[in-house]
Amino acid sequence: MKFSNIRRAAVSMLAGLLIITAAGASAAGSLAGQEGDRRFPPALTRDAKSPCNKAYKAYVAAGGHSAYATTPYSRVVSLYIICGSSLNAPSQKVAEGAAMKSCLATRAHYKVTTGGTCEIAASK
């Protein structure tokens, strides 16, 4: 009987350690809340409802590989900011490609020529 009690206690402790370790590993693997590799600071407007602000906040909150692309801002040349993002892609490279594609498609949709070309501002 003693062996049975010891065995139950050991299994119970191992199960508890496994749960604690699994929870810690999943938290360590998440990219949520991180800005990732910033190549240049994205110019965000003060309007919280702006599509680019929403896209950047979604990029930061995303837990997987994501990227945010935008046109660089210059007070003299830029009248507007165009952006694109990709969230939770299989890899950082795929996320960057999709974000660039999204930004370029938005730029082509509005048929703008000034403001510079799309660049990856941040990726993770």
Image (cartoon, grey):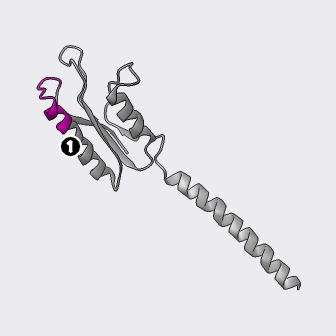
Up the image or down, 59 lies above or below 18; here it is: above
Pointer 1 local density, CA inside 10 Å: few below 14, some 14–19, many at least 20: some
Q: Residue at x 38, y 20 (%)?
A: 47
In the rendered image, the quadrant that contains the C terminus is top left
Q: What residue does disc 1 label?
A: 101
User: Residue 70's x, y, as percent?
Assistant: 26, 32
The picture quadrant where one finds residue 38 is top left
> Is residue 26 shown in magenta?
no
> Is residue 108 shown in magenta?
yes
Up the image or down, 82 lies above or below 96; here it is: above
Q: How many marks?
A: 1
Per the rendered image, the range of residues in magenta is: 104-115
Q: Residue at x 18, y 38 (%)?
A: 105
In the drawing, does residue 31 fall left or right of residue 37?
right
Residue situated furthest right in the rendering? 1
Give the camera-side residue of 80 and 43.
Answer: 80
In the drawing, does residue 100 fall left or right of residue 19?
left
Up the image or down, 6 lies above or below 79; here it is: below
The local secondary structure at tag 1 comes to helix
From where the camera sits, is residue 35 visible? no
User: Residue 81's x, y, as percent?
Assistant: 25, 25
The picture quadrant where one finds residue 56 is top left
In the drawing, does residue 52 fall left or right of residue 107?
right
User: Residue 69's x, y, as percent?
Assistant: 27, 36
Q: Residue at x 88, y 86 (%)?
A: 1
User: Residue 111's x, y, as percent?
Assistant: 12, 29
* Amino acid type shown at disc 1: Lys
